[in-house]
């Protein structure tokens, strides 16, 4: 069984710098100047999952993204990690898309590059974190899907997979073709080797603009987005704060007073603790 | 189907293993508030899918005026394809104005499927919703780990949908005089369309160890700076001495010092609002702060005086976390 596998990725501003994000005081737009763009962290877990399936069953792994032209760099990184080929969907017409329009565009790209037996994504992106693109992509492709996948097993032309829940998981059986949105805990993405970087330079990377895809313009970008963005603001979470100073024991004593003041009955706890001994 | 009402504020009540998830009550309380903000009030409706669900009357006590029960063996365990088929038909037939769901594992999966099938917008993992002067739903959605909040509207399509994070709306309140009808909806027509592409096999529940974060009045939280599994046990000891729960940040989950990522606090984890938040050796990354900002008293210990967590703390202690944990435990034990 040889499988044609796709992995959808998203370049995002590095989450380590989110405290540097500001809102332009006049234009009221989000300013992310100087923040590096990286591959959405959990998307590497998605690629790792795909590579493991390929290693077990044979086949091909393609990575795909809808992003500005400079995302080529991010795709090369995924090729260096082990993907076989890459597709970049880039066009001004795709801009301003919400999850429905984004997933539509990605679906049309996947149809052109595919068909695929298995599609992997991460559960969510670090920036918007809506986590809605995987399910909506599966809908546009008319394939079944599972979100928040913590474990899976390929069996013939089907899958057994666990969807992570708040207090446990649900076991599912899915028919291929299928889309799996994987959690970070599912695996540890492999490191990229120097050899991988060398090979990546020669691997195929195809660019698709709107003209290359079969598209209904009404479903694209801003126009194809049922949700509209209103005002943006940065909530103030600041507290004035007071520093407790002194020797460790003095600070601990102040803390005890504060905890008592907050209504904690430390004496009772103390007695109970002593009573246990 | 009985009385066909115009519009409606719908809450898709979630059940797992026949028990209703508390987020459903939080959503109903919010639905009641939205009803008052609408130009002409619309009924608050709870929809519950399952095989047999306990205590559905509770939905009425938290404000549902109509409870639509959709019970069938095929709906016992959540299956996205099947649940979406039923809800799509139900929503198309009854045409609610608003549909709210919990931003739980199930809600975050089901809502976008419905959005795609109904070709309408879904505002994801909102921290609040309100009705604006034009009578539209405005959903407040965090981005960039909560550093930015944005209003999301869905003015041109119906229903306007939103998922809301469990815990962000605060404790739900029961209505003083519950008055509700129960409507049983037969899903067999919808279920006939099921292609059987996905099949739920079983729900496996994993017992939580220690006190759940949502119920704790005191939460002791540690970050990556705790340094080791051994030091982590100090946090657990302190939490137990204070009768509280243990929480953590993302790096701690990655280091596997905690058994379950259910202990993670932040935008992709839990939103908490304890009376007392005691944080040790955590930097205060935006995505963590977004999940704890509504806490009562925030006390932080960090050896880095410039740690961002201090900017959102009521009390700052600049120092080594292990030293303070050990001293505090010793003091409480009275030794």
Image: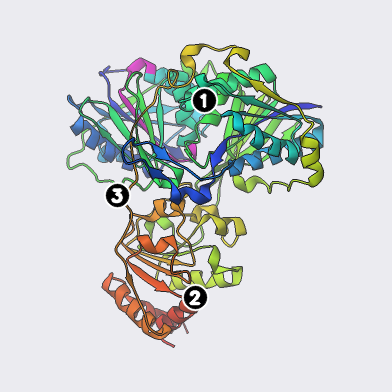
As helix, strand or loop, the secondary structure at mark 2 comes to: loop
Task: Return the x and y of residue B239 as percentages of the image width and height.
Answer: 44, 69
**Chain of residue at mark 1:** A
| Quarter of the figure that contains the N terminus of chain B | top left
Membership of A117 in magenta stretch: no
**In front of the other: B68 or B308:** B308
Question: Would you name the residue on which mark 3 appears?
Answer: B171
- Nearer the observer: mark 2 or 3; the answer is 2
Question: Would you name the residue on which mark 2 appears?
Answer: B320
Determine the residue positioned at 51% across, 33% down.
B78
Can you tell which mark lies on residue A28? none
Q: Is residue A109 left or right of residue B241?
A: right
Q: Are marks 1 and 3 in contact (CB under 8 Å)?
A: no
**Chain of residue at mark 2:** B
- The answer to whether marks 1 and 2 sit on the same chain is no
Q: Which residues are magenta?
A: B92-106
Q: Is residue B295 left or right of residue B241?
A: left
Q: Earlier in the sequence, mark 2 or mark 3?
A: 3
- The answer to whether marks 1 and 3 sit on the same chain is no
Q: Is residue A52 left or right of residue A257?
A: right
Query: Dot 1: few (<14), some (14–19), or many (≥20) neighbours within 10 Å?
Result: many
Q: Is residue A251 above or below residue B195?
A: below
Q: Is residue A153 visible?
A: no
Can you tell which mark lies on residue A102? 1
Query: Dot 2: few (<14), some (14–19), or many (≥20) neighbours within 10 Å?
Result: some
* Disc 1/disc 3 C-alpha distance (Å): 35 Å
Q: Is residue B182 visible?
A: yes
């Amino acid at each position: 069984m040889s499988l044609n596998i796709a992995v959808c990725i998203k370049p995002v501003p590095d989450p380590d710098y989110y405290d540097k994000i500001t809102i332009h005081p006049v234009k009221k737009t989000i300013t992310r100047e100087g923040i590096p763009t990286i591959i959405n962290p959990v998307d590497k877990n998605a690629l790792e999952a795909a590579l493991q399936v390929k290693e077990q069953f044979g086949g091909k792994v393609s990575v795909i993204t809808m992003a500005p032209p400079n995302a080529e760099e991010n795709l090369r990184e995924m090729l260096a990690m082990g993907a076989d080929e890459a597709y970049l969907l880039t066009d001004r017409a795709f801009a301003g898309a919400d999850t429905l329009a984004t997933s539509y565009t990605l679906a049309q790209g996947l149809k052109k590059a595919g068909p695929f037996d298995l599609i992997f994504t991460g559960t969510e992106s670090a920036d918007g974190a809506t986590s809605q693109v995987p399910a909506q992509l599966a809908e546009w492709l008319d394939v079944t899907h599972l979100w928040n996948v913590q474990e899976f097993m390929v069996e013939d032309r089907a899958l057994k997979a666990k969807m992570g829940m708040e207090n446990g998981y649900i076991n599912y059986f899915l028919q291929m073709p299928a889309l799996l949105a994987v959690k970070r805990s599912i695996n540890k993405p492999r490191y990229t080797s120097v050899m991988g970087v060398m090979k990546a330079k020669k691997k195929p990377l195809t660019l698709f603009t709107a003209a290359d895809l079969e598209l209904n313009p009404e479903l694209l970008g801003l126009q194809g987005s049922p949700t509209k963005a209103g005002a943006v603001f940065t909530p103030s979470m600041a507290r004035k704060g007071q520093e407790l100073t002194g020797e460790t024991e003095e600070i601990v004593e102040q803390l005890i007073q504060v905890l008592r003041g907050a209504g904690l009955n430390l004496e009772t706890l103390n007695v109970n603790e002593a009573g246990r001994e | 189907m009985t009385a066909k009402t115009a519009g409606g504020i719908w809450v898709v009540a979630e059940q797992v293993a026949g028990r209703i998830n508390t987020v459903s009550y939080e959503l109903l309380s919010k639905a009641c508030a939205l009803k008052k903000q609408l130009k002409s009030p619309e009924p608050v409706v709870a929809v519950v899918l399952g095989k047999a669900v306990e205590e559905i009357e509770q939905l009425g006590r938290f404000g549902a005026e109509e409870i639509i029960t959709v019970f069938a063996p095929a709906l016992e365990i959540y299956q996205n394809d099947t649940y979406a088929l039923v809800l799509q038909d139900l929503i198309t037939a009854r045409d609610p104005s608003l549909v709210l769901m919990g931003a739980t594992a199930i809600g975050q999966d089901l809502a976008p499927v419905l959005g795609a099938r109904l070709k309408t917008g879904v505002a994801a993992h909102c921290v609040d919703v309100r009705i604006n002067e034009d009578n539209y739903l405005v959903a407040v959605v965090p981005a960039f780990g909560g550093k930015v909040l944005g209003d999301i509207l869905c003015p041109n399509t119906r229903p306007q949908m939103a998922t809301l994070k469990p815990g962000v709306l605060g404790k739900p309140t029961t209505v003083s005089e519950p008055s509700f009808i129960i409507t049983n909806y037969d899903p067999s027509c919808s279920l006939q369309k099921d292609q059987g592409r996905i099949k739920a096999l079983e729900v496996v529940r994993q017992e939580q160890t220690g006190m759940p974060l949502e119920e704790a009045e005191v939460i002791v939280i540690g970050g990556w700076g705790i340094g080791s599994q051994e030091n982590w046990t100090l946090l657990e000891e302190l939490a137990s001495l204070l009768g509280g729960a243990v929480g953590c940040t993302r790096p701690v989950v990655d280091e596997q010092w905690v058994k379950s990522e259910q202990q993670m606090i932040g935008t992709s984890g839990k939103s908490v609002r304890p009376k007392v938040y005691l944080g040790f050796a955590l930097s205060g990354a935006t995505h963590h702060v977004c999940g704890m900002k509504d806490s009562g008293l925030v006390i932080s210990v960090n050896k880095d005086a410039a740690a961002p967590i201090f900017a959102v703390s009521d009390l700052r202690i600049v120092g080594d976390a292990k030293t303070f944990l050990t001293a505090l435990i010793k003091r409480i034990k009275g030794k």
